[in-house]
Image (cartoon, coloured by chain):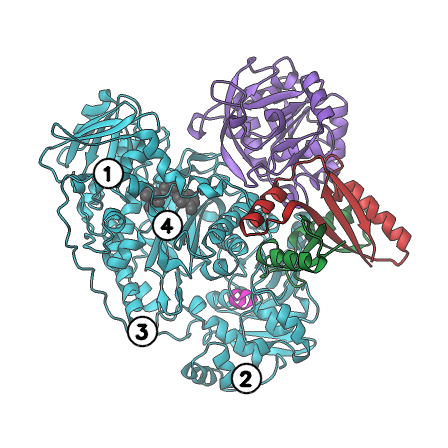
Chain colours: A cyan, B purple, C green, D red
Amino acid sequence: MRWDAEANLELAREHGLHPQEWERLLAALGRTPNLVELGIFSALWSEHCSYKSSRAHLRKLPAQGPRVIQGPGENAGVVAVGQGWVAVFKMESHNHPSFIEPYQGAATGVGGILRDVFTMGARPIMALDSLRFGDPDAPRMRYLVDGVVRGISDYGNCVGVPTVGGEVDFHPSYNGNILVNAMVVGVAREDGIFYGRASGPGNHVVYMGSKTGRDGIHGATMASDAFDEAAAAKRPTVQVGDPLTEKLLIECCLELMSRGLVVGIQDMGAAGLTSSSFEMASRAGCGLVLDLDAVPVREHGMTPYELMLSESQERMLLIVTPGNVMSVINLCKRWGLDATDIGRVIGEPVVRATFRGGPAFELPIAPLVDDAPRYERPFRRPEPAAPATLPALRDRDWGTELKTLLAAPQLVSARRIWQQYDQSVGAATVVGPGADAALVLIPGTRIGLAATTDCNSFACGLDPYCGAAQAVAEAVRNLACVGAEPVGVTDCLNFGSPENPTVMGQFVAAIEGVAETCRVLEIPVVSGNVSFYNQTSGQSILPTPAIGMVGVVAEVRHVPRGSWELGEALYVLGPLEGELGGSRYLQIILGLEAGPVPAVDHVAERRRSRVVAELVRLGVVAATDISDGGLVTALVRMGSPDCGADLTIPWDSLVARVLFGEWLGRFLLAVQPACEPALVQACEGMELARLGTVGGDRLVVRAGKRIVLSESMAELCGLPERQLEWMEGVQG
Amino acid sequence: MTDGGRRPRVAVVIFPGSNCDRDALAAVEAVGGEAVPVWHQSRDLQRCGAVLLPGGYSYGNYLRAGAMAAHSPVMKAVRRHADQGGAVLGICNGFQILLEIGLLPGAMLMNRSLRFICRDVHVRVERTDLPLLRTLQPGQVLRLPIAHKEGNWFAEPAVVREVEQQGAVALRYCDPSGQVRADANPNGSLQNVAGLVSREGTVLGMMPHPERRISRLLGGEDGWALMRALVEAA
Amino acid sequence: MQVEVRVKLKEAVLDPQGEAIRRVLSSLGFEEVTQVRVGKLVLLEVEGDDCERVRARADEAARELLANPVIEDYEVRLP
Amino acid sequence: MQVEVRVKLKEAVLDPQGEAIRRVLSSLGFEEVTQVRVGKLVLLEVEGDDCERVRARADEAARELLANPVIEDYEVRLP
Ligand SMILES: Nc1ncnc2c1ncn2[C@@H]1O[C@H](COP(=O)(O)OP(=O)(O)O)[C@@H](O)[C@H]1O
Ligand SMILES: [Mg+2]
């Protein structure tokens, strides 16, 4: 079938449009579209581009705040971080491609999110990755873990942006649908921000970067020329990343922008030339004419359909004034990049394209972008998981249980993953992976930007509202541990099918949990991403609203410590006893998927986080938050193989809750004896318990006079390293 | 070569895909030099007294790390500079380029683990009587980060013997106490080689990144002296 | 017996490495080289002298491990 | 004309990648594979139809860029 054949309902269906959407399309257009126009509609009306199921709920997220310069709607969010600097950040998913081809899927995921950030005029200074895999023993799972990590490593390391943090978790619900979410933080001067707007009729449209091939065109198979069926069979469904070109794009685009040579700029991400051209025109209230014969191609005989929908990587679209076109092309040449003039901005709000001398398509912009379908999907609010009926948790073999916990995939040390990432390129990493949050200096300054990603999807499965709220609270605590105050959130909401009312209910509850917590804690959500349809054979993943949070340290004077030192005193700030509902102890040791996951106590969280951040900035304490696995796993994280601790908890406390309880906004603090008075004074009016001191090579916990746990630190510290030991081995 | 109180000029070469160039420029300035960015297509070194080939992925490290950069126009000027006794420091990818153009012996294979490795290592300083190492103490142990996938130095046995006889090994991977041991070798490099120096001591190639370690806030100052030696040699 | 498994990127798949090599070759004066694609040459030493059996096994190994069917094609060659 | 440059590690050079593949193959039941070596297959599309000239040029390209004589051997093959 030819690209200019008339479309029909049947073809619309194959493009994923519902019959009502087809009717809506016909009404909006007032005529029957041709095939390329149908392809464009289906791309822009897809869930991915239009947010048709989520938009109504995303509105609940607080996007305002005194620091916010650009909220959701642009390529990335922008917040002011002091001294005229802004942080530009976003998180995005690349789940499905990574399941098909983990290496290229993850690599191009990193590439895409980098472009979203430097497109805004910001230099990327750090990347994080939030990963979810299935049962480590499930088929293909090691191959997937390995491929994803290599993909992130080879791409991120080559472009020279340090990967400084992230998370990794395992759960069988991801067996058929892994999650690869990548976050990038960039910095710019406040007056150096650029937007994806095609403004100024008469301006030129310049295509820059890699040539267009037939990569990742999702439409119906018949969309290719009929006599080219052999080629259709060979069409790659996965895109291949080229990090060298990406690196050159970063440098060249930043130089073009700093020289004031571009009016607007956007990368060609999902749906390639289609989304970049329509979205840029829409934001500016203008239109475009495109000469498709001018689009640089990698393969022969590409049709308008393929040109508009290709997802070849490392491509940008620039809007340039007529007088600057030559300068732009020359600067690109200096960086070894191709740039081509492919069209003009016009006043009329349409995109019109020509091909081989004739018209290819002409579409009005509003129906495709602003008036795309919106759905109020029916949803069923989830019932939070019932509280567990717990066995009597007395006089158990706490040491053995701790070891079982530490050896579980959920408590894995990600060291073998992040050791494959360049963490310090840029020479600005104060705290890299392995700590609660990363801390990176804005180049040439003492301003520290901190970042973390968090989401306990096990808890979100039990109670999407509280689980999501807790993810926000945990992120705040993680930032506090490196001394930072939160300034903004980006999110990546990974869920099953929105057409399933139960999944939709999880989605709504999770958004409300994030929204409420961010609103009360006054942290704006400035960018994000929704990934639906994460399911296989009707089986949805756990609801996974990954939270990426950025914080600021106005002036970094000390390196925050993640570990304790000999002779220090250990304190718990917050309740000594945690909650077992939704804890790793319940999940792993007792095999109970049960709640309740507690609600966030906003007042306490905020007070404690502020105080901890301040003490860390002053260099008074080393801090870590008490999350996955409870106090004992925090102790192991803070200790080292040759340096343990001796703690005493009150004889009448509930040992399981002290050792393994989670939630409630608790911190573990280590402090030099000389600084104890300062700590106690700073925490006045808050729950603060002194548990003991650092020393010896064992972790010893006493309840009153009775020893409840005594284990070799070397052994404990070694356990979380075991899971990924196979990564040390080599493979082809 | 300081003339009239001016700071010594150090050329930092930028290839397409270099990614430690900005860090190198900043580090040269921080230790008192004047850092001069030099583009790979340049045919001269802009009156610089020393050259730094920074780390990164020149030409994406496609084909072999450093292979394509070795053919850049600027490398002719770098070779001439080296032949005339000028100082050249190659860090990581810069070291790989120096091997590819034969200014230092051997070649880099992929790390034994076949993976990229980024972590701190300890290296022992083997020579201090040469220009690019004279700011260091004999036997001094430095803690520096490595970040590479191809740092597994290889040469034929005869070449290895020659390298050892000449004392061309400048830095060796060691444990924190300075013992050169197999388990302190992160990548399988022969003789635990982390850095090689030319006979005259004016060309130095090393896998660890001294330019990332010149500040207490950023992991320590163990790279300071090496960067300083380069500036003094300019 | 030595068996050669030739693994190549599928035709329509982008080969950034090949393209970078082409550019450098061209700048070195090899303008007549109009395209470069890089593949893998996996040389297996296999026990046994039943050619058909060895070929079948090599094919199996290529399919299972040596080539990534999503983006690569392979070919098995016997001496 | 298509020219094939085969780049292999020299015999004396350890090939950890090949060895890793061998081990995985063996764990997958391919015990009859006793050695694996991985090389590169560089496929050049070269203009011109004077075979000898094309071969000579490809040889030059391989010597200058495609292979590193310290660790690799190469071989040029015409169709
Ligand atoms: N996929 C990953 N990439 C990079 N760093 C990771 C990854 N997974 C975990 N990390 C790092 O390992 C450390 C522990 O992770 P996690 O247990 O999630 O920390 P926390 O509970 O404090 O959020 C963190 O420093 C985190 O940044
Ligand atoms: Mg976490």
Q: Residues at badges 4 and 2 in contact (C-beta under 8 Å)?
A: no
Residue found 10% across the figure and 33% down from its top: A651
- As drawn, is D57 to the left or to the right of A613? right
On screen, A490 above or below A16? above
Three-letter amino acid code at the position of disc 1: Leu
Q: Nearer the viewer, residue A595 or A81?
A: A595
Q: Is residue A647 above or below residue A608?
A: above
Camera-side residue: A48 or A363?
A48
Do the residues at discs 1 and 2 belong to one chain?
yes
Q: Which residues are magenta?
A: A271-277
Dot in front, 1 or 3 = 1
Q: Chain of mark 3?
A: A
Crowd band around label 4 with a 10 angstrom C-alpha radius: few (<14), some (14–19), many (20+): many
Q: Of the residues under marks 1 and 2, which one precedes in the sequence?
A: 2
Horizontal side of D47 relative to B16 (left or right) equals right
Q: CA distance from mark 1 to mark 3?
A: 41 Å
**Given the image, on which type of amino acid does mark 2 rest?**
Ala
x 67%, y 49%: residue: C47
Name the secondary structure under disc 4: strand
| For marks 1 and 4 on the same chain, the one whose residue lies earlier in the sequence | 4
Between the C-alphas of marks 1 and 4, the distance is: 19 Å
How far apart are the two marked residues, 3 and 4, measured between alpha carbons? 30 Å
Residue A430 pos. (x, y %) = 42, 33
User: Which badge, 3 or 4, comes first in the chain's sequence?
Assistant: 4
Mark 4 sits near ligand 1, with its Cβ under 8 Å away: yes
Residue on which disc 1 sits? A631
Residue tagged 4? A169
Tell which tag, 1 or 2, sits nearer the viewer: 1
Instruction: Describe residue C74's horizontal placement relative to residue A217 as left or right.
Output: right
Mark-to-mark CA distance, 2 and 3: 28 Å
